[in-house]
């Protein structure tokens, strides 16, 4: 965080580092914020942002190392960051029918994948946590030895070419795996909804606790305003920015992606959303995949 005095007497300007992915849901969320379309700050301070766009696992690693003031992270990564970062109630990727898919070249039973090579979009992703929880539910001793971490956009080609037996696809891969001749073996979001009765929490926005409650609340409010700005514009105004960063350029894929991952939970987490996050963390802790933290998730 950089801080310099500017403008009115006593007014401070803070420049915060901001990390998010190039996926359409994130660029739609942050378009208005990083382009100065919405106000960010309070009565005595103004906020500006220096954005860094990176793959989800790169963001997870940067957050884990405390390198960003504000960053999008997988909820599984956030399990390991709770002491240093607080969650925001705006900007989350959470909902129903939007979880990661396990895909393969042949339509085999996912229970037969024990010990097979599985491409994953990073060890700290919620997709990997869900796969580990699924394996645990089947009594698999561990999935660790047979996973192949890679950038999410490389997973479908790797499965198609036989470099992996199956793969966990996220983001727009949910809509495009059929283009690679792949079959859906398991919807891990659906599995989660069935075993928990709750929506699937994929990722959220984390803010360094050291920023202080006033700054964190101001960022949270600005992100909510940024989401509403883009949704109100349907998101035509942000289209060029979104397309410039998208892995898939087809408008139909971009629209489907935003429609699925930018929803009411994204604007503001409700009680169900908070319970879903808490349940995911509780299951991760019981399974031995995360350690408990005494810090509250949110700044009250």
Image (cartoon, helix red, strand yellow):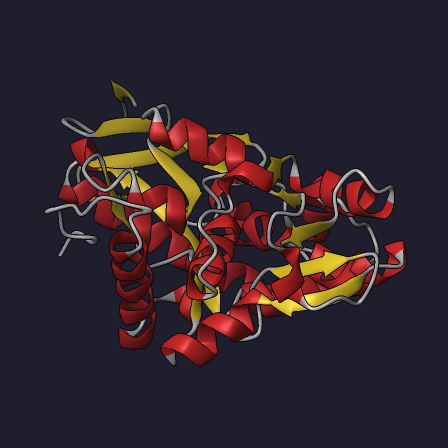
Say whether residue 190 is left or right of residue 213: right
Residue farthest to the left?
Answer: 294
**Residue 16 appearing in the image:** no
Q: Residue at x 15, y 37 (%)?
A: 212
* Quarter of the figure with residue 233: bottom right
Q: Position of residue 282 (x, y in %)?
A: 25, 60
Query: How many numbered circles are shown?
Result: 0
Q: Image quadrant of residue 73?
A: top left
In this rendering, position of residue 225 left or right of residue 99: left
Give how far across and how far down residue 283 sits, in percent. 30, 61
Left or right of residue 246, residue 219 in this image: left
Query: Do we see residue 172 in this rendering?
Result: yes
Viewer-proximal residue, 238 or 294? 294
**254 vs 180, nearest the viewer:** 180
Q: Residue at x 65, y 36 (%)?
A: 151
Q: Nearer the viewer, residue 101 or 52?
A: 101
Q: Is residue 205 left or right of residue 174?
A: left
135 over 167 or under it: above or below: below
Question: Eyeballing the image, is 280 above or below 238?
Answer: below
Tell me which corner region of the image, top left, top right, bottom left or bottom right, holds residue 172: bottom right
Please name the residue shown 29% across and 66% down the image.
279
């Amino acid at each position: 965080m950089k801080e310099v005095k500017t403008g009115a007497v006593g007014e401070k300007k803070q420049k915060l580092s901001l990390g998010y992915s190039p996926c359409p849901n994130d660029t739609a969320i942050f378009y208005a914020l990083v382009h100065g379309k919405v106000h960010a700050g309070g009565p005595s301070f103004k906020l500006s942002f220096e954005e860094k766009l990176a793959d989800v696992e790169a963001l997870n690693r940067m957050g884990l190392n405390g390198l960003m003031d504000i960053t999008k992270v997988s909820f599984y990564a956030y399990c390991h960051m709770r002491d240093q970062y607080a969650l925001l109630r705006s900007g989350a990727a959470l909902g129903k029918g939007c979880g990661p898919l396990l895909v393969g070249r042949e339509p085999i039973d996912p229970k037969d994948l024990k010990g097979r090579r599985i491409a994953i979009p990073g060890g700290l992703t919620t997709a990997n946590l869900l796969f580990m929880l699924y394996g645990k539910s089947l009594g698999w001793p561990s999935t660790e030895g047979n996973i192949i971490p890679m950038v999410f956009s490389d997973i479908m080609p790797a499965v198609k070419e036989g470099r992996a037996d199956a793969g966990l696809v996220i983001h727009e891969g949910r809509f495009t795996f059929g283009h690679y001749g792949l079959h859906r073996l398991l919807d891990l979001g659906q599995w989660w909804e069935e075993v928990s009765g709750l929506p699937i929490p994929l990722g959220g926005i984390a803010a360094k606790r050291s920023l202080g409650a006033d700054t964190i609340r101001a960022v949270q409010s600005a992100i909510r305003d940024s989401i509403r700005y883009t949704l109100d514009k349907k998101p035509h105004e942000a289209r060029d920015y979104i397309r410039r960063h998208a892995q898939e350029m087809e408008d139909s894929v971009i629209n489907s992606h935003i429609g699925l991952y930018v929803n009411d939970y994204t604007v503001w987490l409700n009680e169900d959303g908070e319970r879903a996050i808490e349940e995911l963390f509780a299951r991760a802790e019981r399974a031995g995949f995360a350690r408990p933290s005494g810090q509250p998730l949110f700044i009250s």
